[in-house]
Image: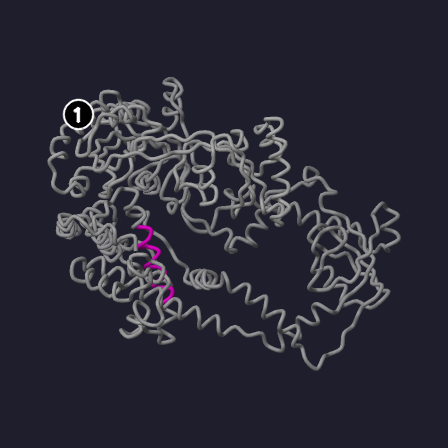
Amino acid sequence: MAAIGKIREQSTLLLILIGGAMVAFILGDILSNRSTGSGDRYVGSVFGEEINLVDYEQRVEAQKESMASIGQPISSEAEQQIRNQVWNNMVQEKVMYAEMNKLGLRIGQDEFDDIRFGDNLRPEFMSDDNFKDPQTGQFDPKLVQNYFAFLKERYPLFYENQVNRIVNERLYEKYNTMVREGLYVTTIEAKDDYYRQDQKVRFQYVMKPYDAIADSTIAVTDGELKAFYEKHKDEERFDRQAQVDIKYTVWSVSATPEDEEVIKADLAELKQGFGEADNDSLYVLRFADTRNGAPMDLQTKENAELAAMVETANEGDVIGPYKEGNRYAIAKIVKKGTEELATVRHILLSKSTEPDVEKLKARADSLKKVIQKQNNFEAMVTAFSEDPGSVQTGGRYERFDDKTMVPEFTEVSFKKAIGSINVVETDYGVHLVEPLERLDVPKLTAFVVDQTIEPSNQTFDRAYDEANEFSIAAKDVEGMIKMAEEKALEVKESKELQASSRTIPGVTNSSDAVFWAHNSERSKVGKLSEPFEFGNQVVVVGLVNRKASGIAKFEDVKEEIKPEVILEKKKAILKEEMAGKTLDDLVASGLTQQVAMNVSEKTPSLPSGSSEPYVVGYALTMSEGDQSIPLVGNRGVYVVKLESKVTVEPKETYDSYRDALSEAAGNAIKTYNAGVYRALKDMAKVKDERSNFY
């Protein structure tokens, strides 16, 4: 509901008309420049069904227009977020509606009204202060009705987005509830859990660990690696997305002193109009970068330049320009007064360490007496305070107002005598608080017009020209590395960069560079790009390698699978070494005999520290006194000799086991909704092909 506060400045509605007219132009540009044919004009697929590029782009533009219609600026970062949000929404709709349509799930107008202002309200409306009666503080459903009526009339695009969001969320909730309520532990499951838990064995065993054989002693041929690859290549882990390896050089562009002077001059020109403005909020929304149309408190205590300006200013005056962080600003003062700030030091005895408050108070009283006698407050802070936020500063909190701290702490800080030592209890524990200083400082409320300190076009052009000359002179990746060394420029690299990454490390919103590297028509291995502009950075990218999507090639995973082939050979070696030998023979050869007691299929942990379900499961099939063949476990190869087995009989009822499984399922439900969607999404085989266009 934060959007309520952004519904302002009617002139922004013009953006809807402009945006709508631009959609065809934008799509035309995408289709003509980034597609190789009509068959490629989709951005992905779900269940094998293509998501059309035009449909996707229209929804992106509709979302942008929706945000623009309520005065929300669309930065490049915000646009990327919108694109990802629209994509995720379209995927979720296709995944979930495929299931919900089978069940006939719907939401009618009556239900839609009921969850907004009826008896089954959504939490987002109940908790929003905008929908509470200002007199009583209670939720007022009429305010929700008025809000949606207002949106429908004045901001139809935003209204439509809100309706779609609420309807989809409600349908997803209904589906997840049906699945969750369908969970039931059957008698067969409870009986199985009984046997897995209560049927136990005790056995002697020896184990020879795999790391007893050094990897370096195992010879692996290319033929063995190739055979392993052929056997396993169809496994999902070898299914690779398209990947590229790149090198790149970044020119970070900062505002020059001359740029800052231009910004200050621009703001100075706005001062007269600001002073004469009848509507300060609209003036701010029109000219300020941050577009905060509400008055704010000016913070002067850490800004000497601003403090000097406000000292002689009166209400109605426009002061500035002054520097505030990475911005310059002018401010129109609407209220001038003073406020009291306090500085204290304290010692916290935390309730998390000692819940008994009376004990904490007694300890605080003892510390107080020591401090009063020895005047050693800072030493006592170091020795006893449990407030990590102030220990390093001697327990001091500097110049805070009467709204910063909890009420009990505030009362002592502002009301007790300077230099007095006071014991006070708060929700955090018991404090020893000594007020050190109280002073009145100017408090100013003002409307602020600010401009971000950014490089000018001329400054940016100089950096771009430098990067462009670099790209032309270097010609290729090898030249890039050599020239960068000569010019003391850093060459960064990113390996196995997938198209879905949408960005290169250290460069925000750099999807165009990723697209360039993945597009075989625009880039060639070994070649350099023209300079890209991303925010205040200029980037030249070199393509080192490109790998197509599909099953990974043998050469690309050869080193990856080598440890697995080595492990398989170790298993075979150890099995052969231990075969045909008694437990006594194996102990005599240097292996340690151990005893596993009361292990079961459900609790297969052995004294050697590893979980070995296969070894325990095998032991459960043995007869007392029998010795196993060598068994391949997780940690090594085992030989076991069964001492005893607890054989359980069927029970009349398995209620206690059913109850335990139901409780475990109930705990899992807390994260169940996300798990259900992940499972359905995995089945849908979602493909994201947006990198073909963006």
357 above or below 284?
below
Instruction: Tell me: 497 left or right of 51.
Output: right
The residue drawn where x is 39% and y is 19% is 488
Rendered-image quadrant of the N terminus: bottom left
The residue pinned by badge 1 equals 265
Q: How many marks?
A: 1
Q: Label 1 neighbourhood size at 10 Å, few (<14), some (14-19), many (20+)?
A: few
Magenta part, dominant SS: helix
The residue lying toward the viewer, choosing from 680 and 358, is: 358
Which residue appears at 23% of the width and 47% of the height? 72
Asked whether residue 129 is in view, the answer is yes
**Label 1 element class:** helix
* Residue at image point 63% right, 47% down: 354
The x and y percentages for residue 12 are 16, 48
Q: Quadrant of residue 58?
A: bottom left
Q: How is the image coloured?
A: one colour
577 within the magenta span: no
The location of residue 679, given as percent across then percent down, is: 47, 62
In the current view of this chain or complex, which residue is farthest to the bottom? 652
Mark 1: amino acid: Ala
Among the 4 quarters of the image, the one containing residue 172: bottom left
Magenta segment: 83-97
Q: Can you tell which quarter of the image residue 166 is in? A: bottom left
Residue 89 is covered by the magenta coloring: yes
Residue 541 x %, y %: 34, 32
Give the side of residue 439 with respect to residue 199, left or right: left
* Residue 441 in the figure: left or right of residue 344: left
